[in-house]
């Protein structure tokens, strides 16, 4: 009888480990409830005040798939829209802690924040995962 662990590679390549780690991180984010619809409800960790002024107003925004939706959009000090030099648009989480973590991770003091995945999704307008870096 062959068990699943019989095929386990005890010495995976760096590429195999990166795939496993990236997949695990993405699933943990989903488990923790990372959703773009929650961004307007983020609070400032230092003041305890909402990052997006109340009452939260709906705003017509362009989604990652190019469509437009009226959503509860967070303040610009939480989420910002950007574009690459090639014209590819994306949204980034720009809270101070996320921005500092991204700067440290990528050794780039000029990063404004951490990008959200910009793949079109019917489940998300802004992105429900961190952008995968390769």
Image (spheres, rainbow, N blue to C red):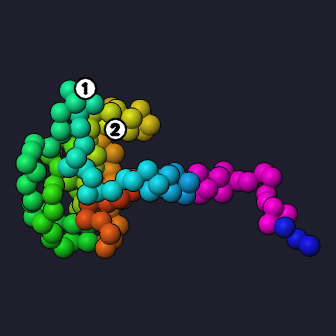
Q: Nearer the viewer, mark 1 or mark 2?
A: 1
Q: Quadrant of the N terminus?
A: bottom right
Real-space CA distance between mark 1 and mark 2, rounded to the nearest whole angstrom: 14 Å
Q: Is residue 17 left or right of residue 114?
A: right
Q: Nearer the viewer, residue 1 or 111?
A: 1
Q: Residue at x 15, y 62 (%)?
A: 71
Q: Position of residue 31 (x, y in %)?
A: 47, 54
Q: Is residue 25 left or right of residue 110?
A: right
Considering only vertical position in the picture, is 111 above or below 130?
Answer: above
Asked whether the residues under the numbered discs 1 and 2 touch, taking CB atoms below 8 Å apart as contact, a structural biologist would say no
Magenta-colored span: 4-22
Q: Quadrant of residue 78?
A: top left
Q: Position of residue 54 (x, y in %)?
A: 9, 45
How many numbered marks appear?
A: 2
Q: Nearer the viewer, residue 45 or 7?
A: 45
Residue that lies at the very extreme toward the right in this rendered image: 1
Q: Residue at x 18, y 73 (%)?
A: 67
Q: Nearer the viewer, residue 47 or 132?
A: 47
Q: Residue at x 44, y 37 (%)?
A: 105
Q: Which mark is residue 98?
A: 2
Point out the tag, 1 or 2, that comes first from the N-terminus: 1
Q: For numbered disc 2, what is the local secondary structure?
A: helix
Q: Which mark is residue 46?
A: 1
Q: Nearer the viewer, residue 1 or 102?
A: 1
Q: Position of residue 39 (x, y in %)?
A: 25, 50
Q: Position of residue 81 (x, y in %)?
A: 20, 53
Considering only vertical position in the picture, is 38 above or below 62?
Answer: above
Q: Residue at x 21, y 72 (%)?
A: 66
Q: Is residue 21 magenta?
A: yes
Q: Is residue 8 magenta?
A: yes
């Amino acid at each position: 009888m062959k068990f699943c662990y019989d095929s386990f590679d005890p010495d995976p390549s760096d590429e195999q480990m990166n795939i496993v780690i990236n997949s695990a991180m993405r699933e943990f984010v989903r488990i923790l409830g990372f959703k773009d619809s929650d961004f307007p409800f983020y609070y400032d960790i230092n003041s305890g005040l909402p990052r997006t002024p109340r009452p939260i107003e709906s705003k017509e925004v362009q989604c990652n798939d190019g469509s437009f939706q009226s959503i509860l959009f967070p303040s610009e000090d939480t989420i910002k829209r950007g574009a690459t030099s090639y014209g590819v648009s994306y949204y980034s989480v720009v809270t101070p802690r996320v921005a500092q973590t991204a700067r440290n991770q990528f050794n780039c003091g000029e990063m404004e924040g951490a990008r959200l995945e910009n793949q079109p999704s019917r489940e998300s307008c802004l992105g429900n995962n961190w952008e995968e870096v390769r």
